[in-house]
Image (spheres, helix red, strand yellow):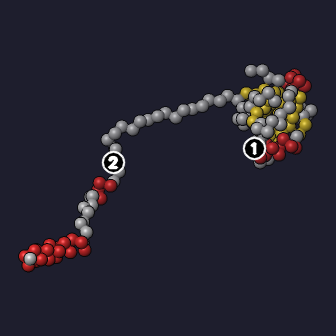
């Protein structure tokens, strides 16, 4: 019995340091944590896609905006971005003083999420920012000034 007790005591004493000091985990070399060196791989060169957009003059107004009415409600919506041109200056009107953006009530170049457009109207935009002003004209009356493609 003394031998078994002595053997148990020896095994217990050998186990104590292992219990006090858990097994050490080997760490990886920090050099393994760096990103891969891919300089030897050829870089794929993707050419940028260019989008060609041709703006078009649709009206020539020699007397300026005479006969058009300024719409304050649409101007406020335009200033908030709720009524305006899909592409600023895609269609435009030529006057002696300035160029104005144009959108049609049929939806050509018009962004109108609140459906404020009226049939047979043409909208002229002075700016497309917080100072936007919208002028409205009757499409039938403006036909003599229409410039075809």
First-in-chain label (2 vs 1): 2
Q: Residue 36 carries which label?
A: 2
Give the CA separation, mark 2 to mark 1.
Answer: 47 Å
Up/down of 39 relative to 124, above or below = below
| Dot 2 alpha-carbon crowd within 10 angstroms: few under 14, some 14 to 19, many 20 or more | few
Up/down of 17 relative to 81, above or below = below
Residue closest to the eye, 140 or 12: 12
- Residue 111 at x, y = what percent? 75, 36
As drawn, is 74 to the left or to the right of 54? right
Q: What element carries label 1?
A: loop
Q: Residue 120: name its quadrant.
A: top right
Residue 51 visible in image: yes
- Residue under the image location 29 percent in, 56 percent down: 31
Residue at far right of view: 67
Residue at far front of view: 1
As drawn, is 70 to the left or to the right of 39? right
Residue closest to the eye, 94 or 28: 28
Q: Which mark is residue 81?
A: 1
| Dot 1 alpha-carbon crowd within 10 angstroms: few under 14, some 14 to 19, many 20 or more | some
Q: Residue 67: name its quadrant.
A: top right
- Residue under the image location 80 percent in, 36 percent down: 115
- Residue under the image location 14 percent in, 74 percent down: 8
Number of numbered tags placed on the structure image: 2
Q: What element carries label 2?
A: loop
């Amino acid at each position: 019995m003394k031998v078994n007790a002595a053997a148990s005591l020896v095994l217990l004493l050998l186990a104590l340091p292992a219990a006090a000091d858990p097994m050490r985990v080997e760490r990886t070399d920090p050099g393994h944590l760096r990103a891969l060196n891919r300089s030897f791989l050829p870089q794929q060169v993707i050419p940028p896609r260019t989008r060609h957009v041709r703006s078009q003059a649709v009206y020539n107004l020699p007397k300026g905006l005479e006969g058009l009415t300024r719409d304050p409600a649409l101007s406020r919506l335009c200033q908030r971005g709720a009524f305006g041109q899909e592409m600023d200056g895609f269609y435009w009107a030529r006057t002696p003083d300035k160029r104005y953006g144009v959108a049609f009530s049929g939806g050509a170049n018009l962004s109108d999420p609140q459906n404020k457009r009226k049939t047979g109207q043409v909208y002229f935009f002075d700016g497309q920012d917080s100072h936007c002003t919208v002028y409205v004209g009757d499409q039938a009356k403006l036909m003599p000034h229409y410039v075809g493609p």
